[in-house]
Amino acid sequence: MTAPAWASVVAAVLAPLRRTKHYVCDEDCWYTCSAATEERDGGHSCDDSKSGKPCDCGLDVHNAKVDEVAARVGAGIAEVEDVAFNQGASWEYSDGIGVEQPTSEDMRAALVAAFIAASKKEEG
């Protein structure tokens, strides 16, 4: 698979980490995120000077970081996959006797290893 294809797979795995609503303070709407809306988030800011301004609760920054992790891990997996294929490895599995299927734990370990490799590559 290509890096963007792997990134979409990793993004699906990381989807539960994404935030879906901007911060709403029910006790004092002056502390509610400037990007919050009644329809989407269940509240809005009482501070009209913040209305229509960018998110100030961290949701957008948080989700951008989750997306960045998905892209970096996807690129790392694609790179590992390319190296493995260049060395003659096969990612094809069968249901034959004695052939082990990768478990979710195996996939998790592969994701962690790819992320670490991508992080080290960026640092170095």
Image: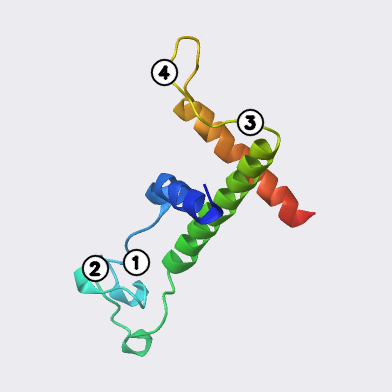
- Front of the two marks 3 and 2: 3
Circle 4 Cα neighbour tier, 10 Å, few/some/many (<14 / 14–19 / ≥20): few
In the drawing, what numbered circle is on residue 22? 1
Q: Which residue is mark 2?
A: 40
Circle 1 Cα neighbour tier, 10 Å, few/some/many (<14 / 14–19 / ≥20): many
Q: Quadrant of residue 56?
A: bottom left
Q: Position of residue 79 (x, y in %)?
A: 64, 47
Task: State the SS at label 1.
Answer: loop
Q: CA distance from mark 3 to mark 2?
A: 47 Å
In the drawing, what numbered circle is on residue 95? 4
Q: Which residue is mark 3?
A: 89
C-beta proximity under 8 Å, tags 4 and 2: no
Q: CA distance from mark 4 to mark 3?
A: 18 Å
Q: Earlier in the sequence, mark 3 or mark 2?
A: 2
Quick one: 50 or 107, which is closer to the camera? 107
- Front of the two marks 3 and 1: 3
- Residue type at mark 1 is His
Q: CA distance from mark 4 to mark 1?
A: 46 Å
Give me the residue at 31% from left, 88% from top. 48
- Residue type at mark 2 is Arg
- Residue type at mark 4 is Asp
Q: Earlier in the sequence, mark 4 or mark 2?
A: 2
C-beta proximity under 8 Å, tags 4 and 3: no
Q: CA distance from mark 4 to mark 2?
A: 46 Å
Q: Earlier in the sequence, mark 2 or mark 1?
A: 1
Task: State the SS at label 2.
Answer: helix
Task: State the SS at label 4.
Answer: loop
Quick one: 9 or 108, which is closer to the camera? 9
Q: Earlier in the sequence, mark 3 or mark 1?
A: 1
- Front of the two marks 4 and 1: 4
| 112 sits left or right of 121 in the view | left
Q: Position of residue 22 (x, y in %)?
A: 34, 66
